[in-house]
Image (cartoon, rainbow, N blue to C red):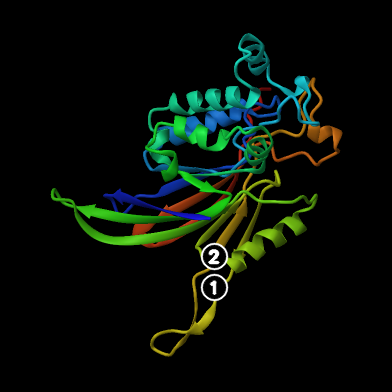
Amino acid sequence: MRSITRIIEYSSRADEFTIHPLADIHFGAAACDEKRFSERLDEIDADPLALWLMLGDQLDCIGHKDPRFDISSLPRWLVLRWHESGKLGLAQHQRNELAERINAHETLGDKLLAVVEGNHEAMIRKHQDIDAYLSLIERLHRGSAERLALGVSGFVTLRFRRTVGENETRAGTFSVVIYLHHGWGGGDLAGGINLKLERQMDRYGADVYLMGHHHKVTTHTNPGVIRPNSAGRIEQGADRLGAVCAPFLRCLVDGSDTYSEAKAYRAAPANADILVRVRPDKHEVDLVERSRREAVIL
């Protein structure tokens, strides 16, 4: 477990920051929704007040020796690249291509707050001596890997500082503590997954809690603790917000079989997003569940 602190300066009382937690991209699987993922990267890049997090399973990392491996589950670009270059394994090709697509966006490296290791990156490291997690971070255009790597879980503390005037004097600081964990275990229904989220919210002190892994979307609000304040008056602390974030891995792909389909898993949300919106000057934090709809041409 690690802790990362970021200082974020802003100038207007009206500024609203949007934090995008991207979970379970599974880049390198045919079931990865690359179009939706690219659109999300474009959205973050275009918004000057956007920030983002990577919550694990960035890469699919299922090698050809893995019993789950099926060449039909790979996207065509990866199959071609793998056959053309026998020097690198699948995980390295996935890592290199994902880093290239992120680095193609001018601002994404500077807006990235932290990267969590998922079980897919952990398994390839344990069984095939390939650290796709740290080597991906090292290829991103932002400082050193150590500044972004949280491991399986940790805290990101954001200290928002408003600057005033030509000399940019600081007018105050508003802090938001985010607890991140990739997630663990299975579960088909939302009830069991909500219990895991709520237990983590009881165990660790933060303002916002974000998890992935389950390929579902769920949110939960934990009430603040009731206790006497410094003046002896009884008060209730601030509510704490938690979410299991949506994946980019589709359960069903038209014209192809998927691992999720073979195991009869429920379909994952297709166009849902979790967003954390922070208005530092108002000391407000929102947790937003967004679902997009495709335009229908009649």
Asked if residue 113 can be seen in this view, the reply is: no
Q: Position of residue 205 (x, y in %)?
A: 52, 66
Q: Secondary structure at mark 1?
A: loop
Asked if residue 176 can be seen in this view, the reply is: yes
Nearest the eye: 278 or 249: 249
Name, please, the residue furthest toward the bottom. 232
Quadrant showing the C terminus = top right
In the rendered structure, are the residues bearing label 1 and label 2 in contact, judged by CB atoms less than 8 Å apart?
A: yes
Q: Position of residue 6 (x, y in %)?
A: 37, 51
Horizontal arrangement in the rendering, residue 31 relative to residue 49 (left or right): right
Q: CA distance from mark 1 to mark 2?
A: 7 Å
Q: Residue at x 62, y 34 (%)?
A: 129
Q: Position of residue 249 (x, y in %)?
A: 68, 34
Q: Residue at x 85, y 33 (%)?
A: 262
Q: Position of residue 267 (x, y in %)?
A: 77, 39
Horizontal arrangement in the rendering, residue 75 relative to residue 260 (left or right): left
Disc 1 crowd, CA 10 A, few/some/many (<14, 14-19, 20+): few
Q: Earlier in the sequence, mark 1 or mark 2?
A: 1
Q: Secondary structure at mark 2?
A: strand
Instruction: Tell me the residue that label 1 is attached to.
Output: 224
Nearest the eye: 142 or 110: 142
Horizontal arrangement in the rendering, residue 192 relative to residue 161 (left or right): right
Instruction: Tell me the residue that label 2 is attached to.
Output: 240
Amino acid type at mark 2: Arg
Q: Is residue 241 above or below residue 126?
A: below
Q: Quadrant of residue 73?
A: top right
Name, please, the residue furthest toward the left. 167
Disc 2 crowd, CA 10 A, few/some/many (<14, 14-19, 20+): many
Amino acid type at mark 1: Gly
